Image (cartoon, coloured by chain):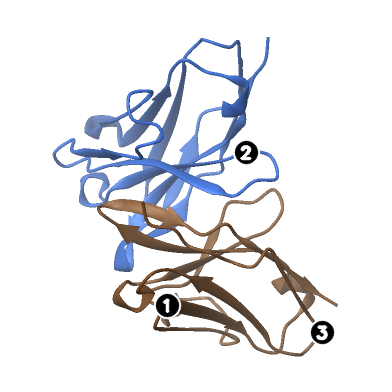
Amino acid sequence: QVHLVQSGAEVKKPGASVNVSCKASGYIFINFAMHWVRQAPGQRLEWLAWINPLNGNTKYSQKFQGRVTITSDTSASTAYMELSSLRSEDTALYFCAKADVGATLGYWGQGTLITVSS
Amino acid sequence: SYELTQPLSVSVALGQTARITCGGNNLETKNVHWYQQKPGQAPLLVIYRDSHRPSGIPEGFSGSNSGNTATLTISRAQAGDEGDYYCQVWDSSTVVFGGGTKVTVL
């Protein structure tokens, strides 16, 4: 059974960086892309980026290009998302999601709340 | 960049049919996926590739895609079908979500 377990909630000050991890189990990690999606309170889903763990290739949303970095550690079956230069508008629930049939986001982590506040 | 347009809200009487639309330029040339999200939960895939239901999703969920509009249909709506629904496509190797539609079962 597929499980994606994310790291815990964090509170950060404006200008800081945050790193969120997503540990995968129940499938062969390198065989499926991993996506990162966020959702500000009461707002829509917003896609950030995806990574192919097999070769490390990445694709970023233009909106976050240069401010978000996603990586993966195949030995630990874990994906990481780093967001830098945080501002209050980055306060959101951040999800990792495993690519699935039909290039969907078939399995999701539980979400990590990142709060940016001075 | 590609945009998907959804109505903000849809209401449906208990046991009746709800239809949620998703509009995009030449949308029929893309595969449209639909997610259900309940408060405090991660999204759940309910329809993929326009009209396919993942294992475990009730038969009351169906989808179609023609022209510039994809539609998610919820038949025999139940209270448990309330939530936010998002359409999603791929465009230029990026993921695009619609703005989401809040479904209320009356």
Where is residue B36 shown, x and y percent of the image? 59, 64
Residue that mark 1 sits on: B68
Which tag, 3 or 1, sits closer to the chain's start?
A: 3
Under circle 2, the secondary element is loop
> Which chain, by letter, is brown?
B
Residue located 62% across and 38% down the image: A40
Which amino acid, mark 3? Ala
Q: In the displayed structure, would residue B54 be above or below residue A68?
A: below
Residue located 21% across and 45% down the image: A30
Residue that mark 2 sits on: A40
The chain letter for the residue carrying disc 1 is B
Along the viewing direction, whichever of A2 and B51 lies nearer the viewer: B51
Which amino acid, mark 2? Ala
Between label 3 and label 1, give the one nearer the viewer: 1
Where is residue B61 shown, x and y percent of the image? 57, 82
- On the rendered structure, is B87 left or right of A113? left
Where is residue B66 shown, x and y percent of the image? 40, 85
The chain letter for the residue carrying disc 2 is A
Q: Are marks 2 and 3 on the same chain?
A: no
Under circle 3, the secondary element is loop
Quadrant housing residue B15: bottom right
Which amino acid, mark 1? Asn
Residue that mark 3 sits on: B13
> Which chain, by letter, is blue?
A
- On the rendered structure, is A12 left or right of B32? right
Mark 1 surroundings: few (<14), some (14-19) or many (≥20) residues within 10 A = some
Image quadrant occupied by the N terminus of chain A: bottom left
Mark 3 surroundings: few (<14), some (14-19) or many (≥20) residues within 10 A = some
